[in-house]
Amino acid sequence: MKAVKRKVDALERQAQEDQQEAQKSCSSGELQVGVSADSMRSKTLRLTGKLEGVKNQVQALDPESIIDISEISRENFITVKGLWKLLALLKQKNQEAQTKCSTLESELESVKQKAQDERSTFESELESFKQKAQDERSTFESELESFKQKMHSKCSTLESELESVKQNVQDERSTLESELESVRQEAQTKCSTLESEFESVRQEAQTKCSTLESELDSVRQEAQTKCSTLESKLESVKQEAQDERSTLESELESTKCSTLELELESVRQEAQTKDSIKEAAAAPAAVTPPPTAQSASALSRSLKNVRQRNSFTACLSTDLRTPQIWDVQLLPGGRLLLVDWSKDCVNLFNTQGQHLHTLECRSAPYCLAVLDSSSIRHAVAVTLPDSSAIDLLEVTGDDIKVKRTLQTSRGYDAVAASKNNTLAVGYFSGPNIDLIDLGGRVLRHICSIGRPRYMNIEDDGYLVCSTVYNKIVRVEVGTRTIAFDKSVPQIKDPSGVNITSDGSIIVTDGQNKALHLVSSQGDWIKQLWSVPSDGDQDDKLWSVSMDGSVCVCVTGRGSVFVLDYS
């Protein structure tokens, strides 16, 4: 009985293990749908076989022995009952597993059917695609064949055209080669001709060079002779100048003494006049007119003889353009300084018309003024409006040099030399006339008038200028008082102005090309001179300059007239 009990216990343990394994298998089957149905079926059959074996063993037992066992031990009976329950549970689980296996088989069959359907669909689509690809390939092959035919025809056409072009090029090449050969022959002929001509020209040039060398030697000898003569003349002139200087110094000394005596006499006369006025203070005094400038008739008599000495044209042999002369200044020694606006230069001539020197300016010059400078010998100021500058020139002998350049605040046009190393300068827009020093600094403003053209300053401090509005203006520089600002009917186009020793004003009429005399009050006296009628009718008389008894007038196109007056 102990052996049966041990066997039953072993069967119970085996049944429990199989139950646990079946539960695990069922759980695994529920979680993993893909568990093989054959594995579940084999496990179920194995359990069923084991249970059948247990049943057979139990049935093979002697009933009396079972009763005896039940009577002896209740626990064994309970164990057999649990085993039957376990067997029933295993049958139930086996049935469920078979059901799930059937379900899985049906699902697998449906999946297989669906896969078979999709495969059929894919195969049909693949067959359709193959057919479409075959059709497209056929179309492409036909188009390719057509393209090949077209290209073949085009290649044939191009080959024929290329052949014709080759033939044309060959023909043109032959033509050009023949023309080139003819040109080469002609060039060789011309080269031969030119070589012969060049040889003759070279022979002629050598002959001329020999002649020029001989002439140059003779000219050199003549120049040396003239230089020696000029040196001797220069030495004599220096000696004469020294003698004249000594004479002038002695005359100056005597003149100073005479001047001092005259001033002393005038002071004495003035003192006597004041005493007489004091003595006759109670009595009515006779009204005497204030001292005025020389009367018009007296001036007319004093300048009644004006005659033309000579004339010339201030043009150089190298000039390519007609000159435009704006201003002239007569210097000591019979030299003329002319401003040529068109060629940006200042030219030096003598009164006989001989050109002495040319000074190039950095911009177009306009007006000239002679300075009384202690630092520059024979100093002349020239305005450069476009450069806003004034050049101070030194004119010695036949040479002109720029000694200093004054940079000004504006581009002044007109200029006149004042005392104490100052310059009166005029500008076309207000304020018009300023007083500057020789450093270019504005000392003060003199006056505002209508666009000054030419200016000059008297020894007594009066400034006279002409304007573009056909007026003549006289201003006292010290007090900046305008003495008169008027138009003179007899002068249509007042331009250059100059002042004589007696205070009268000489004015050029640019339009009428005449020289007029005006009193210090601005009254017209008479016409002194006019340009001969055989001159250029479109030319204008611009500037005038005086030195002693010599007067020089210039026109815009370079005609220079040297006048004598007495």
Image (tube, rainbow, N blue to C red):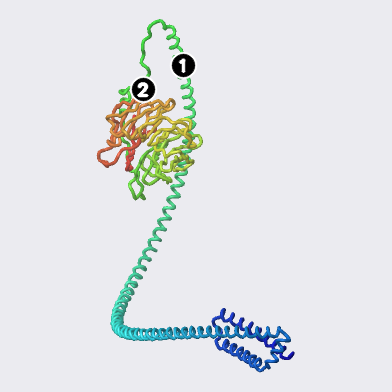
Name above or below for residue 432 compared with residue 192: above
> Which is more N-terminal, label 1 or label 2?
1
Q: Amino acid at mark 2?
A: Ala
Query: Among all residues in the image, which is located at the extreme top?
Result: 282
Q: Which residue is mark 1?
A: 267
Query: Among all residues in the image, which is located at the extreme right?
Result: 2
What is the x, y in percent for residue 204? 36, 64
Looking at the rendered structure, the secondary structure element under dot 2 is: loop
Residue 71 figure quarter: bottom right
Q: Residues within 10 Å of mark 1 (few under 14, many from 20)?
A: few
Contact, mark 2 vs mark 1 (Cβ under 8 Å): no
Q: Is residue 335 left or right of residue 83?
A: left
Name above or below for residue 45 compared with residue 325: below
Q: Is residue 508 left or right of residue 74?
A: left
- Residue located at (33% from left, 42% from top): 558
Screen quadrant of the C terminus: top left
- Residue located at (60% from left, 84% from top): 88
Looking at the rendered structure, the secondary structure element under dot 1 is: helix
Name above or below for residue 69 compared with residue 312: below
Q: Which residue is mark 2?
A: 293
The one of 256 and 454 positioned closer to us in this rendering? 454
Mark 2 or 1: in front is 2
What is the x, y in percent for residue 288? 36, 13
Screen quadrant of the N terminus: bottom right
What is the x, y in percent for residue 169? 30, 80
What is the x, y in percent for residue 456? 39, 32
Q: Residues within 10 Å of mark 2 (few under 14, many from 20)?
A: few
The one of 303 and 558 positioned closer to us in this rendering? 558
